[in-house]
Amino acid sequence: MQNRQVVIESLPQDKLELSNFAMRTEPVPAPGAGEVLCRTLALTVGAGQRAGLQGSATYAGAPKSGVVMGGSAVARVEASESNSIAVGTLVTCPAGWQEYSVHEARAVNVVDEVDDPAHHLGVYGTNGLTAYFGLFALGEPQAGQTLVVSAAAGSVGHLVGQMAKIVGCRVVGVTGSEEKCQLLTDTLGFDTAVNHRSPDFRGEFREACGDGIDIYFDNTGGDILGGALRRMKTHGRIVCCGVVSQYDTGAPQPGPRGVPGLLVNNRVRMEGFLVFDYADRYAEGRAQMRAWVEAGQLKPLQDEFQGLEEMPRAFIDMLAGGNVGTRIVRVAE
Ligand SMILES: NC(=O)c1ccc[n+]([C@@H]2O[C@H](COP(=O)([O-])OP(=O)(O)OC[C@H]3O[C@@H](n4cnc5c(N)ncnc54)[C@H](OP(=O)(O)O)[C@@H]3O)[C@@H](O)[C@H]2O)c1
């Protein structure tokens, strides 16, 4: 049996290109003692993977070419040399961009059978948990407060905004097109949304923020962070989740002006986090989000590509804002 893989052919010098990736075929590996062979059903692409290729995600180590591109999959166990995981079990695993992967049994997560296994890569996966813990552990939302979230129609952002609405916040989304703004307000219940590509973004953003921002959930850094910093209320919180505006480039801009002066004057807390910090509380986050999903209060959105060979295109298009919700690539039935 053959295992198709997508490998990093070369590291990007500036914008990521299709030519940075190549397809390769190898024999399917056999699991050793204590290991399982997983067949990839679906993969997701996340913006943070571009930071990994840039070398700015220090937790991911130094990027290198000639290896299978990393990534999270939902998969079925196809063969098992472990007493703890049976053939047929549904798991999530760090498969990388390939059809089959071998893992130590303790390195895969057994997950519930849900209507669509791909939800384990979105709302119940890393990005859902990032939204949940970033919002509740760092943002500390209270009913009546104003929350602004950037990359608001993306995988993390669309969940942050909806959960902030559930607990009674006034929610402002910042996203990259009029269609996405409309989706946020009409389908997901955001109070208002602003297009960061609008020629009058500054004025529209100022107006949308009303009397100021209590919580800014920052997925983008860059000019949107700069604008939010100037609109923070006293004792506001800036949740530093990621810097997607500065990933797909060889020359990232420095941080915005006003740090630390604006933080001092307004007693604003600006704090970064990694979702892994909350690993011992994942079950709590998943259970709460599942309850909201099942009650119809939280709508996880995903969009899809078909076929492993589409991974590079799905990734590059997501970085350019082509996605709504979590981007999924289906690899096998
Ligand atoms: N801290 C953690 O542990 C952790 C874990 C997971 C993810 N993250 C971070 O969460 C953020 C969102 O990741 P995701 O995987 O959910 O991606 P995503 O939001 O689904 O996709 C990225 C989005 O970024 C927006 N974007 C791209 N370039 C932009 C620019 N120059 N200015 C403004 N927006 C831009 C695009 O939407 P528009 O159409 O709206 O422009 C695009 O859809 C990233 O910063 C990622 O690093 C952090």
Image (spheres, rainbow, N blue to C red):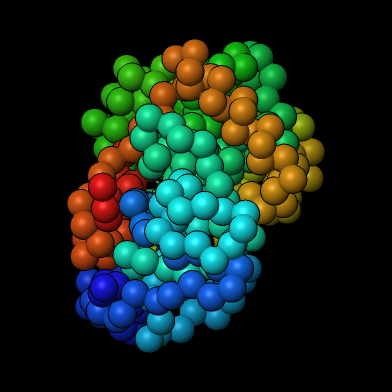
Residue 205: % across, % down = 44, 32
Relative height, residue 142 to residue 274 (above, below): above
Residue 98: % across, % down = 34, 67
- Report the label total: 0
Where residue 101 sits, quadrant-wise, is bottom left
What residue is drawn where x is 33% and y is 38%?
Answer: 302
* Depth check, front residue: 96 or 240: 96
What residue is drawn where x is 22% and y is 50%?
Answer: 305
What residue is drawn where x is 29% and y is 24%?
Answer: 182
* Depth check, front residue: 70 or 74: 74
Where residue 38 sits, quadrant-wise, is bottom left
What residue is drawn where x is 39% and y is 72%?
Answer: 69
Residue 299: % across, % down = 41, 24
Does residue 182 appear in the picture of this structure? yes
Quadrant location, the N terminus: bottom left
Relative height, residue 236 to residue 38 (above, below): above
